[in-house]
Structure formats: C-alpha cells, structure tokens
Image (tube, helix red, strand yellow):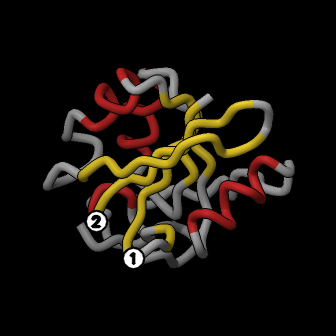
Amino acid sequence: MKIAVPTRNNFVDEHFGHCEYYTVYSINGGKVEKKEILESPQGCGCKSNIASVLREMNVTTMLAGNMGAGAQNVLGMHGINVIRGCNGNVDELVNQYLAGNLSDSGTSCSHHHGHSSDGHVCNH
C-alpha cells in the first residue's frame, strides 16, 4: 500500500493543489517501509496530471488537508481514496492513519468559489 500526503515543510499542506511536494509512504505489514518525495506540478490539483502520476506509483490513499470536489473526484476516478481534514506533521499523521485513528472530515473546499458552507476559505 502507498499513501500520499500533500506537504510543505514536513507538515500537511492546507490545500493539496498548491503543495510544495507530496510525501509518498510505502507501507508493508502496517509499518512505513519507505518514504519518497514527489515534486508537485504547478497549478490547480484537479487540472494537473498528479492523479495519474500517483496512480502509476500505486498510491491508493491520500491524506489531505482540504481540496475541492473536482480534485477529489479526479483522484477517486484514479482509485485513490481521499481522507480530508488532516493536519500536522506528515510522519505523525501517517502513523495515526496506520493506527486507525483518522477519518474523513467530510468537508470539501468550494472550488474556485471562495468560501464553503463551513467558512473555509480556498485560495485558488
């Protein structure tokens, strides 16, 4: 199993489409076996080819801060399950996920519209 986390300075980037890079974790036997860095393409996440690149790397899960519905749909079409509402240090976050202590927040950014119903501001 592989997990990707949108990252900036070793912390979850609040908005996946504008992250500095993706940290990709290879998991074996419930433990992190390998960690690699994937540079982020420039531009909006749902319009980039990042979903297909992650799929080619066999990523099946993305632990993300927030993202628009378009990005979540594109990742889903590539077989990548998204868990939103994540924050903090990426290594600690992956360990929380592996321990079964994370669930999806159910909140998406209102892509290109400025504010979602919960007041989150998207900076596209």
Mark 1 to mark 2: distance in Å? 8 Å
Looking at the rendering, in which quadrant would you find the N terminus?
A: top right
Is the residue marked by circle 1 packed among few (<14), some (14-19), or many (20+) residues within 10 Å?
A: few
* x and y percentages locating residue 81 in the rendered image: 58, 34
For this rendering, which residue is in front, 52 or 56?
A: 56
Q: Residue 95 sits in which quadrant?
A: bottom right
Number of residues whose C-alpha sits closer than 10 Å to that of mark 2, classed few (under 14), some (14–19) or many (20 or more): some
Q: Secondary structure at mark 2?
A: loop
> What residue type is disc 2 on?
Glu
User: At 60% from the left edge and 75% from the top edge, which residue is drawn?
Assistant: 88
Answer yes or no: do the residues labelled 1 and 2 have beta carbons within 8 Å? yes
Q: Quadrant of residue 87?
A: bottom right
Q: Position of residue 9 (x, y in %)?
A: 39, 76
SS at mark 1 in the image: loop
Left or right of 79? Residue 7 is left
Q: Is residue 103 above or below residue 57?
A: below
Query: Which quadrant, please, contains the C terminus?
Result: bottom left
Q: Which residue is farthest left?
A: 42
Residue drawn at x 19%, y 40% is 48
Identify which residue is drawn at 49% across, 61% down: 66
- Per the image, the residue denoted by label 2 is 20
Q: Which residue is mark 1?
A: 9
In the image, taking residue 110 as reference, residue 113 lies left or right, namely left
* Picture layout, residue 94 above or below residue 19: above
Across and down, in percent, residue 75 comes to 43, 33
Earlier-in-chain disc, 1 versus 2: 1
* Badge number at residue 113: none
